[in-house]
């Protein structure tokens, strides 16, 4: 029987840690078990060469002096204006490379699709509870979901823990090896710890992306540059916006061609002396200055290099009649020049000759990085014309009936029923009130919901099921309407169940459980409290029957008079 590599490595601690780490990464890269992560470094370089050969210099950085000025200006601005954020302090003050990489990893995962202000408290609590990879790997998924509750996109937390366990290694049985364990690693003891990565984070963007679950090209580049000093470019939403404006890229940034070009630019621009700071500076600029609406161009350190700003200035000069021969960039995109001609308010004012302009797409006459002619320039937007907004499919609409089932006289205090969602799919592993997918019409909702409830706790009185209101919660791809029902078991009849995935919790326990924001809003409807607004990456709306109707003063008087004689669920 072969001995595990980790066990052999543990008996050879006199070897340098860096050498063993490189060996592990090389073996992982050459192994057929490594997960594919797209083109490797050579293929990417070939793509960049082909791409640059077919793109106008107007959309490139061909002058090394220009690149030098951009790096200097951006980093100088960042040193003065960067925000004081907990993950930056954590990374800057950490000498241990693995702990530094872990701190960066957690922040980058949390910041995906989530605002900085929302992440700060979550990040602080996370690092206090699990300060190291080993601590996170030892936690349960229930604990991870509980701390992540309300942050959204819950698969991020699960994959972060999976990655931590892969780095640290987990105790496994001989007959139940994890999928990530290579087939030639056979534990000699049922509870032996297998450490495929030796307890250390991969050190390069390529190996980070290939070896860690849920780590894509952007996250890998961010960790490698900030934690390990690798000159790896990054492209997130903020960087896309900055680059599209600086080089006047008006085509759809989500297209393959434009995406490749943006990655090529980011790799070209990243400062090899301060790659982590440069990448953070580019993202910081997009988040605080080069914003989607109302960008503060006067405070931008890259204003003098920005094609979008040049274009706005040129149009303003054209409107004022002060269009000199030096106001139009000599090296520009011919398609851009044609658009500028069409967009001049003074039709008699023609643009300077473009005889010296390098061709952009000589065979087709249409630049693939410029906005299509069907999308004219909007003068009211200015530089915010870039980047082009990608068309999004509207989220599909679904309807669910959910019930808050409560035993107010249960032993030890009132209890409410929660059930656990499946381990895959939307809100995987979180707890919720019993729910069932239904048609929007409420005609058959009570019957379907009662059957669902009885499948968990047995026979229940159908006559007490009351409709209370609704919660409309929009996820990234689903607009889900929860029809909220309530059922209170007044008798002291003990309702218990031994089924897995079922819990009776107190109200205090509910508020600290691993439940989604939507379920907390459902509970507020049940409690009759004023609903709030969902912040962050989701938008939600709560409505109750009492809010759906705007009552006249006279109707309010009648309602208050008849209220003692009407049921709580009646309109």
Image (cartoon, helix red, strand yellow):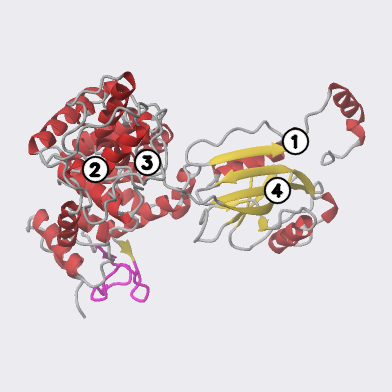
Which residue is identified by label 3? 111
Q: Position of residue 116 (x, y in %)?
A: 38, 34
Which residue is identified by label 4? 483
Q: Position of residue 553 (x, y in %)?
A: 84, 21
Dividing the picture into quadrants, the one containing residue 550 is top right
Residue 82's place in the image compared with 241, above or below, is: above
In this view, the residue farthest toward the bottom is 1
**Proximity of marks 2 and 4: CB atoms separated by less than 8 Å:** no
User: Which quarter shows the C terminus?
Assistant: top right
Q: CA distance from mark 4 to mark 3?
A: 31 Å
Category of crowding for the residue at label 4, using alpha-carbon neighbours closer than 10 angstroms: few (below 14), some (14–19), many (at least 20):
many
Which sits earlier in the primary sequence, circle 2 or circle 4?
Answer: 2
User: Which tag is nearer the camera, tag 1 or tag 2?
Assistant: 2
Q: Which residues are magenta?
A: 172-195
Q: Position of residue 184 (x, y in %)?
A: 23, 76
Which residue is identified by label 1? 548
In this view, the residue farthest toward the front is 348
Which residue is identified by label 2? 334
Q: Is residue 54 magenta?
A: no
Which sits earlier in the primary sequence, circle 4 or circle 3?
Answer: 3
Q: Nearer the viewer, residue 532 or 98?
A: 532
Residue 101's place in the image compared with 438, above or below, is: above
Q: Is residue 183 magenta?
A: yes
Q: CA distance from mark 1 to mark 4?
A: 14 Å
User: Which tag is nearer the camera, tag 3 or tag 2?
Assistant: 2
């Amino acid at each position: 029987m072969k001995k595990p590599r980790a066990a052999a490595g543990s008996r050879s601690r006199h070897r340098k840690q860096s050498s063993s780490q490189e060996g592990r990464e090389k073996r992982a890269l050459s192994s057929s078990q490594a997960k594919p992560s797209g083109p490797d470094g050579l293929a990417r370089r070939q793509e960049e060469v082909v791409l640059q050969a077919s793109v106008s210099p107007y959309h490139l950085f061909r002058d090394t002096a220009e690149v030098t000025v951009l790096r200097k200006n951006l980093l100088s601005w960042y040193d003065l204006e960067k925000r004081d954020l907990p993950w930056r302090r954590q990374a800057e003050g950490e000498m241990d490379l693995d702990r530094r990489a872990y701190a960066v990893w957690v922040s980058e995962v949390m910041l995906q699709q989530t605002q900085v202000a929302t992440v700060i408290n979550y990040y602080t609590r996370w690092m206090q509870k699990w300060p190291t990879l080993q601590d996170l790997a030892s936690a349960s998924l229930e604990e991870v979901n509980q701390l992540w509750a309300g942050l959204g996109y819950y698969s991020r937390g699960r994959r972060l823990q999976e990655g931590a366990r892969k780095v640290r290694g987990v105790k496994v049985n001989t007959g139940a090896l994890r999928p990530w364990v290579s087939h030639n690693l056979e534990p000699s003891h049922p509870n032996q710890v297998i450490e495929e990565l030796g307890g250390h984070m991969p050190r390069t963007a390529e190996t980070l992306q290939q070896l860690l679950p849920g780590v894509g090209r952007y996250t890998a580049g961010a960790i490698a540059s900030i934690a390990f000093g690798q000159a790896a470019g990054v492209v997130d939403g903020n960087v896309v916006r900055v680059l599209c404006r600086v080089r006047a890229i008006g085509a759809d940034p989500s297209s393959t061609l434009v995406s490749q070009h943006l990655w090529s630019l980011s790799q070209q621009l990243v400062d090899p002396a301060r790659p982590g700071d440069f990448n953070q500076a580019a993202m910081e600029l997009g988040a605080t200055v080069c914003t989607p609406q109302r960008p503060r161009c006067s405070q931008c350190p890259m204003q003098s290099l920005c094609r979008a700003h040049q274009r706005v200035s040129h149009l303003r000069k054209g409107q004022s009649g002060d269009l000199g021969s030096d106001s139009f960039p000599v090296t520009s995109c011919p398609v851009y020049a044609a658009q500028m001609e069409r967009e001049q308010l003074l039709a008699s004012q023609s643009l300077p000759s473009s005889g010296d302009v390098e061709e952009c797409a000589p065979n087709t006459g249409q630049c693939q990085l410029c906005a299509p002619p069907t999308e004219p320039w909007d003068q009211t937007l200015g530089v915010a014309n870039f980047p082009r907004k990608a068309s999004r499919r509207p989220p599909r609409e679904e309807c669910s009936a959910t019930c808050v089932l409560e035993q107010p006289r249960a032993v030890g205090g009132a209890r409410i029923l929660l059930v656990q969602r499946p381990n895959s799919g939307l809100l995987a592993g979180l707890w919720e009130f019993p729910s069932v997918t239904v048609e929007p019409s409420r005609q058959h909702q009570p019957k379907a919901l009662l059957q669902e409830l009885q499948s968990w706790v047995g026979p229940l009185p159908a006559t007490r099921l009351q409709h209370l209101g609704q919660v409309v919660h929009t996820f990234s791809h689903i607009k889900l309407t929860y029809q909220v029902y309530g059922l209170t078991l007044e008798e002291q009849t003990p309702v218990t169940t031994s089924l897995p995935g079922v819990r009776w919790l107190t109200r205090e326990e509910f508020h600290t459980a691993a439940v989604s924001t939507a379920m907390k809003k459902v509970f507020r409807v049940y409690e009759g409290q004023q609903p709030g607004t969902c912040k962050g990456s989701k938008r939600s709306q709560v409505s109750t029957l009492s809010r759906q109707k705007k009552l006249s003063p006279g109707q309010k008087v009648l309602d208050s008079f008849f209220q003692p004689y009407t049921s709580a669920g009646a309109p």
